[in-house]
Amino acid sequence: MMEVNGKSRAHILVSGKVQGVYFRQNTLIVATEHGVMGWVRNLPDGRVEAVLEGEQENVSKVIKWCHRGPPEARVDDLNVKYESYTGEFRDFTITD
């Protein structure tokens, strides 16, 4: 895990029944609650992709939540790639 002053960045890909179940909206809520910045989006292949930046502990909490997702979701796989923290985000958004 790459950290800069206790902050980390994770690029995640979530597979399973993760579109049409409010995964992005709930990720926005969970990330905001934990002060995590970045974005989340649906991919054409049915996965959800997100970039998370913030305090390492809070990024880990959002990743842990993504392992199960919202009630109607079924997460089959979660791929996490840690990257260098950039501090480029001011909030968390849903993108296209």
Image (cartoon, helix red, strand yellow):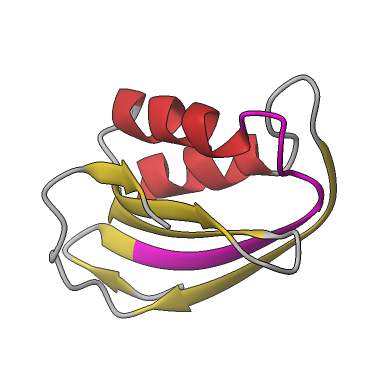
Would you say residue 30 sits in the magenta stretch? no
Figure quadrant of the C terminus = bottom left
Magenta segment range? 9-22
Q: Which of the pair 28/82 is nearer the observer?
A: 28
What is the x, y in percent for residue 10? 44, 65
- Answer left or right for 43 relative to 34: right
What is the x, y in percent for residue 5? 16, 63
Q: Which of the pair 21/62 is nearer the observer?
A: 21
- Answer left or right for 45 relative to 2: right
Residue at the spot 25% in from the left edge and 72% down from the top edge: 85
- Res 73 quadrant in image: top right
| Number of marks present in the image shown | 0
Residue with the most extreme bottom position: 84
Q: Which of the pair 26/66 is nearer the observer?
A: 26
Q: Is residue 27 above or below residue 12?
A: above
Residue at the spot 25% in from the left edge and 59% down from the top edge: 7
Would you say residue 11 sits in the magenta stretch? yes
Q: Is residue 86 above or below residue 20?
A: below
- Answer left or right for 70 relative to 61: right
Q: Which of the pair 92/20 is nearer the observer?
A: 20
What is the x, y in percent for residue 40? 45, 52
For the stretch drawn in magenta, what is the main secondary structure? strand
- Res 29 quadrant in image: top left
- Answer left or right for 29 relative to 63: left
What is the x, y in percent for residue 22? 62, 29
Residue at the spot 67% in from the left edge and 67% down from the top edge: 44
